[in-house]
Image (cartoon, helix red, strand yellow):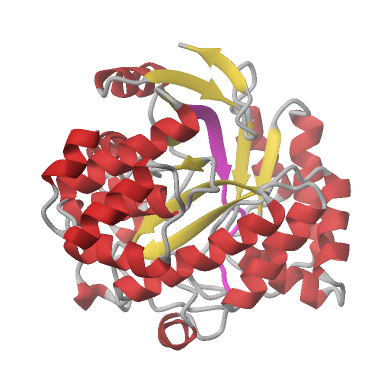
Amino acid sequence: MKELILRITHPELKEIAGAILDGRRITPDEALTLYRKAELSLLALLSAEAKKAHSGDQVFFNRNFHIEPTNVCVYNCRFCSYHKPEGDPESWELTEKEIVDIVRRFDGVPVTEVHITGGVHPSRDIHYYGKIIAAVKKVRPDISVKAYSAVELDYMIRKAGMSFTEGLKILKDYGLDSIPGGGAEIFDAVLRKKICREKADAETYLAIHEAAHNLGLPSNATMLYGHAETPEQRIDHLRQLRELQDRTGGFNAFIPLKFRRENNRMYELGEVPVTEDMRNYALSRIFLDNFPHIKAYWPAVGKNSALMSLAFGVDDLDGTIDDTTRIYSMAGAEDQNPGISTTELVAMIRSAGYKPVERDTHYRTVREW
């Protein structure tokens, strides 16, 4: 890799690349320089080195499934293809029995995690959401429940008149094990007012995750990219996540989520190319030096792009999912019935030259393949 540094002719890029290879944290300005001036091949090499420092030759996945209790939502974000108003013919509201029936589909299947998230329903309270967790745990006490985005948590906890700590403590008592990263979108306040004016702001998102971490509930973090945001806004988003992780160490993984344009009001913006996806993965791995893992959520980008991302710093491919989520399929993602077998995941990881590791929610090894 030192030979690589010698071949870089741009003096600023040479200095930044040297810092990354030496393990020094880069600044937001340096990240912006990388974004604007570095060739994709250089970003691949630098992010691969950064990935190696975190997870060596391992790439992780888990056996999981999703539950989406409803797509009825009080918010109507411009980028969302999932939201439906109450009473819409395309809306759904699962009963507790229907939720339990989903869980029972996996009787005898060695899943380790259920991911529960959906719309922010106007009529549900915190105990309704807690009882969902308890119902899942009653059927499968062995699996980890990762549930409710910060946007859902903000609404249900405020509605209950509680602090974030108090509300999360109640959900933890019901059996909550961790929280997902959804709802971050882009933290920039001006852009947020244009694309998701009504929902929880950046400060609220970060405060909820900090409260969760302080209660021993780990979480993931996300960023919705590829719509109207600028490189500066992306990097500032990452900066705020990095600063929170410095304080708490509670984030397990960062997940860049690609904007998909079908069936929403931002259709005219189009979608960024695969090269931009890879640039974003690489920059995320390099900049978020305190995040243990960078995940490619394959239902969002597709299996081929997820495989490619392993050359750009990604070390987690999420999980098997088994056609239990509709959020990205409703937005036009290529996998309309998202599901993948462990055999296929293992083969993908091996084909990229890495060692497949099946994990649980907390990245404890279940099996080395």
Q: Looking at the rendering, which quadrant does residue 353 occupy?
A: top left
In the rendered structure, does residue 282 fall within the stretch colored magenta?
A: no
Residue 71 forms part of the magenta stretch: yes
Q: Position of residue 361 (x, y in %)?
A: 62, 34
Q: Residue at x 74, y 67 (%)?
A: 124
Residue 121 lies left or right of residue 169; in this view the side is left
x, y percent for residue 363 = 60, 30
Indicate the quadrant containing the N terminus: top left, top right, bottom left or bottom right: top left
Residue 113 sits in quarter? top right
Q: Which of 318/324 is in front? A: 318
Tell me which residue sits at (88%, 56%) in the image: 170
| Residue 299, quarter of the rendered image | top left
Residue 208 vertical placement versus 196 (above, below): above
Q: At x 48% / y 20%, what residue is drawn?
A: 357
Relative to 202, say whether 319 is above or below.
Answer: above
Residue occupying the far top of the picture: 369
Q: Residue 260's x, y, as percent?
A: 30, 62
Q: Which of the pair 152/201 is nearer the observer?
A: 201
Q: How many marks?
A: 0
Stretch in magenta? 61-73
Task: Residue 121: tell me if it is visible.
Answer: no
| Left-right relation of 193 to 139 | left
Q: In this view of the protein, which residue sits in the foreground, 145 or 247?
A: 247
Of residues 58 and 175, the one drawn nearer to the viewer in this rendering: 58
**Residue 213 visible in the current orientation:** yes
Residue appearing at x 28%, y 36% in the figure: 303
Q: Is residue 187 left or right of residue 40?
A: right
Q: Is residue 82 above or below residue 202?
A: above
Q: Quadrant of the C terminus?
A: top left
Position of residue 71 measured from the top left corner of the image (x, y, whole percent): 53, 63
